[in-house]
Image (spheres, helix red, strand yellow):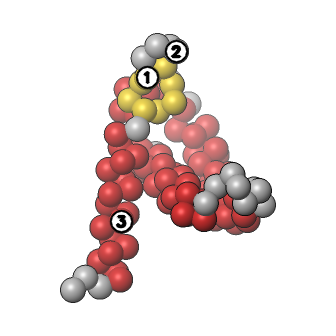
Amino acid sequence: MATACSEVSRTEEAIDRYVSLCPSGFGDGRTRTKHEQALAMLNTFPEWRDAASVVTLAVRHVVEHHLEAHLERAPSGWYAPEYQRLAVLLLRARLRRMERFL
């Protein structure tokens, strides 16, 4: 029988795997750039880590203090509660991923 802790761990691992396979959001409109490719490109700019650190702190603040309340204000027909929880999990996973690269 799985414990709640092991269920959470497996869920986090599955979310992390899912996020690692998602495109970065960058690309040329036809092809999407993988996270690793985007980070390799960013590494060519020496100032990117400093800038990303500032942005990451701001994103962390929003995720930790405002995200769930913001999603709860969306009209009930827009997102089922399960999708709201998934959105929070995905954004937290993307944030963890970005923080690992800094």
* C-alpha span from label 2 to label 3: 32 Å
Give percent across and percent down for residue 73: 78, 61
Which residue is at a point 56% across and 31% down the rendered structure image? 47
Amino acid at the residue labelled 2: Gly
**Which label is found at residue 32?**
1
The reply to whether residue 93 is visible in this rendering is yes
* C-alpha span from label 1 to label 3: 26 Å
Q: Nearer the viewer, residue 30 or 102?
A: 30
Q: Could you tell me which secondary element the residue under label 1 belongs to?
A: strand
* Residue at image mark 3: 11
Question: Where is 29 relative to 85, above or below?
Answer: above
Q: Are marks 1 and 3 in contact (CB under 8 Å)?
A: no
Q: Nearer the viewer, residue 47 or 55?
A: 55
The reply to whether residue 70 is visible in this rendering is no
Q: Are marks 2 and 3 in contact (CB under 8 Å)?
A: no
- Residue sticking out furthest to the front: 77
* C-alpha span from label 1 to label 2: 7 Å
Question: Where is 68 relative to 43, above or below?
Answer: below
Q: Quadrant of residue 14?
A: bottom left
* Residue at image mark 2: 29
Q: Residues within 10 Å of mark 3 (few under 14, many from 20)?
A: few
Amino acid at the residue labelled 3: Thr
| 39 lies left or right of 46 | left
Give percent across and percent down for residue 24: 46, 33
Q: Quadrant of residue 32?
A: top left
| 7 lies left or right of 89 | left
Q: Are marks 1 and 2 in contact (CB under 8 Å)?
A: no
Which of the two labelled residues, at mark 2 and mark 3, occupies the earlier sequence position?
3
